Image: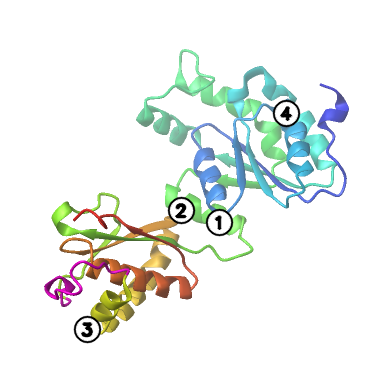
Amino acid sequence: MTEDALAPAPKSKLEVTLVTGMSGAGRSTAARVLEDLGWFVIDNLLPPLLGEMLTLIESEGEELRVAVVVDVRSGSFFRSLQEAIGRLRSADYDFRILFLEADDQTLVRRFESSRRPHPLQGSRLLDGVEAERALLSDLRGNADLVIDTSTLNVHELRRAVEAAFPDEEAVRLRATVLSFGFKYGLPVDADVVADVRFLPNPYWDAELRPLTGLNAAVNDFVIDSPQAPEFLARYAALLDLMSDGYLREGKRYVTVAIGCTGGKHRSVAMAENLAARLVKSGVETLVVHRDLGRE
């Protein structure tokens, strides 16, 4: 590969973060957080391909934030990382290095818990940790941000990365509102389940029975019930309250299941109305009617 292949084009629009550090220190968690924040994440890229890959992405003309995970898994290719970093720093990229580390005792404990070998392990696990630390010493010294995860759990690490890489737009919860019928069983992927069988059932109206909750007449019948508007208002407020906690714990997607007896009338109408409220409040929402058409 020529030197020109590693030299990025001028006036880059790319924001580039190199995610690296000690094995077992939380690189994968940090990468997942960045991905949740909207970064384009590439894992275990060979260092000689860094410049070429960024040039290719840049040629598409998109304003992207790119996170590249590079570590000792790349073997002998890892020796060329410092050279590639030097060329990237001299370019017009908004470039930084995020380095994850932890103390030896913590790393040994994590590897023993996972029952996986260290990538540089010989006869002893600790030998591999020490060898990696020595190999990464210069890279750590040049890092723009170092996060020590020795005393952090995955949630605390997530918050640390989020604080270091704030999104330009507030991260919002994404919701799937799922209608279902209890007689067909609870949805196994539901995070929250609401039972709307307390509402009057259109099934007992002969004219409404063959229709579904997507029909205006059935929707009006369900929503005109005195309890329905209050339920929707309170449930939407409850989800809004829960969303802060979900986001704080790193959960970006929630499935809200709304059930009635057969999943045809009440649950469908209420799911549609709840979804409309969520969309109006700025929540990206998908509506799914699991059991519609099963009868």
Q: Residues within 10 Å of mark 4 (few under 14, many from 20)?
A: some
* Cα–Cα span, label 1 and label 4: 27 Å
The nearer-to-camera label among 3 and 2 is 3
Q: Residues within 10 Å of mark 2 (few under 14, many from 20)?
A: some
Quadrant that contains the N terminus: top right
Quadrant that contains the C terminus: bottom left
Looking at the image, residue 64 sits to the left or right of residue 39; the answer is right
Task: Tell me: residue 265, above or below residue 21.
Answer: below
Q: Give the residue displayed 17% in from the left and 52% down from the top.
A: 184
Q: Earlier in the sequence, mark 3 or mark 4?
A: 4
Q: Earlier in the sequence, mark 1 or mark 3?
A: 1
User: Magenta stretch: residue 91 in it?
Assistant: no
| Quadrant of residue 273 within the rendered picture | bottom left
x%, y% of residue 212? 26, 67
Q: Residues within 10 Å of mark 3 (few under 14, many from 20)?
A: few
What residue is pinned by disc 3?
225
Task: Tell me: residue 223, above or below residue 245.
Answer: below
Q: Give the residue displayed 15% in from the left and 63% down from the top.
A: 261
Disc 1 + disc 4, Cβ < 8 Å: no
x%, y% of residue 42? 61, 37
User: Magenta stretch: residue 200 in it?
Assistant: yes
Circle number at residue 162: 1
Q: What segment carries the magenta color?
A: 199-214
Q: Earlier in the sequence, mark 2 or mark 1?
A: 2
Q: Earlier in the sequence, mark 1 or mark 4?
A: 4
Looking at the image, residue 40 sits to the left or right of residue 36; the answer is right
Q: Earlier in the sequence, mark 3 or mark 2?
A: 2
The nearer-to-camera label among 2 and 1 is 1
What amino acid is at disc 1? Glu
What residue is pinned by disc 4?
49
What amino acid is at disc 2? Glu
Circle number at residue 156: 2
